[in-house]
Image (tube, coloured by chain):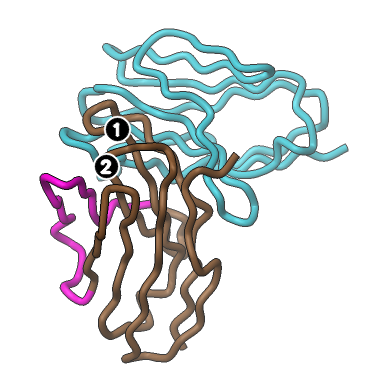
Amino acid sequence: ETAVFQTPNYHVTQVGNEVSFNCKQTLGHDTMYWYKQDSKKLLKIMFSYNNKQLIVNETVPRRFSPQSSDKAHLNLRIKSVEPEDSAVYLCASSYDRVYEQYFGPGTRLTVL
Amino acid sequence: GQQVQQSPASLVLQEGENAELQCNFSTSLNSMQWFYQRPEGSLVSLFYNPSGTKQSGRLTSTTVIKERRSSLHISSSQITDSGTYLCAHYQGGRALIFGTGTTVSVSP
């Protein structure tokens, strides 16, 4: 049963546009994550965030930024999309330091 | 190099056959997780498995921390088992490091 929700399911846009993806979890977790799954299907961490600390994967371009209003929401904003940003973006959550993570269904981004 | 190696890359099964999927880690293993990725892309957590053996229905996961490996056994495979199986371990901190997956295809 889904407890990590993502919108939209799909998004098609053009190079240079700004996009924003939403993620909400109803598990009462205090830590949330964004992962990117590329065309080769490899999943890589982009950000992990709780109300104390944002950890950014150093390989993530600056045009990506997480935005959080409270511990149940973590959105992902891409300021000016590029073709290599086409991928599936997966949101996850967990209790801090307890490790086990639960994933949302993903948002598939296509950049034309 | 790849921190998490999964084998085989792909597997074709006849319905009813058993299968063993392997996951090897190049760094010390703290804890790890097995996932099933549906064809449409959503990830389902199968096991959170710091060490030892866990079973859920027809799936059994065995992790040997000091040997830096984990296996996932599927018994009596069914068509609905088709999809991609991913293992991942926890890097220092919170991030999951994923393997490249094993794609399983079960035919009647």
Which image quadrant: the C terminus of chain B?
A: top right
Q: Residue at x 41, y 54 (%)?
A: A24
Element type at marker 1? loop
Query: Cβ–Cβ below 8 Å for labels 1 and 2?
Result: yes
Q: Residue at x 39, y 53 (%)?
A: A91
Q: Residue at x 54, y 35 (%)?
A: B8
Mark 2: amino acid: Thr
Residue B86 or A104: which is nearer the viewer?
A: A104
- Measured from the top left, where is residue B86 in percent x and y? 48, 38
Image height of A40 relative to B23, above or below: below
Cα–Cα gap, marks 1 and 2: 6 Å
The shade of chain B is cyan
Q: Alpha-carbon neighbours of circle 1 within 10 Å: few (<14), some, or many (≥20)?
A: some
**1 or 2: tag closer to the N-terminus:** 2
Judging by colour alone, the chain drawn in brown in this rendered image is A
Task: Give the residues in magenta.
Answer: A43-63
Q: For residue A50: magenta?
A: yes
According to the picture, the residue beneath numbered tag 1 turns out to be: A95
Q: Residue furthest right?
A: B108
